[in-house]
Amino acid sequence: LETHLAHPGEKADAVMDAVYLLAPNRHADLTTTANISDPDGTLSQLIKGAVASHGHGVFQGKIHVEREAQRTDARMTHRALMLGDRAEIDAKPELEIYADDVQCAHGNTVGTLDERALFYMQQRGIPADEARALLTQAFLIEVIDRIEHEGAREVAREWLTARL
């Protein structure tokens, strides 16, 4: 999946969020580029994913801030969970900034479910598979909660719940 954004600045506010959830032997490649050309624009990007064993998730994101795009505020974050020993996640967030007066940041984290949280849930009678699903949903739901349109948010929430 590729998303290319030509951001005009000029007090425009753009949000480029995504969630991916990969079953075993599935591959997803998300590539995003945003070119911010004029001053006073904001961009927020939150990508979260979870990949099962033998799945492969890829995120490549680039924010390009042109020299004229002063006072830009752009943020890109990618966070992912490996849900099995053979899960694979590759990520490459990039910033290319030519303006002087900006607030831009990017980050990437990849990890596994918290074993202590799984143990805690199992000690309270929640089966291991259900505990993993609940923790994965809690991790991914942040992106879905950012969807402004209530109907779209509920459709995405139902989609995620059905998959877990």
Image: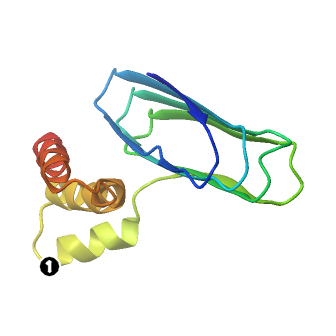
Q: Position of residue 37 (x, y in %)?
A: 72, 38
Quarter occupied by the N terminus: top left
**Residue at the (12%, 61%) spot, across then down:** 127
**Residue at the (45%, 32%) spot, across then down:** 86
**Residue at the (14%, 79%) spot, across then down:** 124
- Vertical comparison of 142 with 64: above or below: below
Asked if residue 81 can be seen in this view, the reply is no
Q: Is residue 15 left or right of residue 131?
A: right
Tell me the quarter of the picture where residue 49 sits: top left
- Vertical comparison of 116 with 103: above or below: below
Tell me the quarter of the picture where residue 162 sits: top left
Q: Is residue 78 left or right of residue 56?
A: right
The residue closer to the viewer here, 57 or 127, is 57
The residue closer to the viewer here, 77 or 162, is 77
- Name the amino acid, label 1: Arg
The residue closer to the viewer here, 136 or 114, is 136
Q: Position of residue 69 (x, y in %)?
A: 77, 47
**Residue at the (59%, 55%) spot, across then down:** 11
Q: Position of residue 108 (x, y in %)?
A: 62, 50
Q: Position of residue 156 (x, y in %)?
A: 19, 45
User: Please, what secondary structure does the residue beneath circle 1 have?
Assistant: loop
Tell me the quarter of the picture where residue 133 sits: bottom left
**Category of crowding for the residue at label 1, using alpha-carbon neighbours closer than 10 angstroms: few (below 14), some (14–19), many (at least 20):** few
The residue that mark 1 highlights is 124
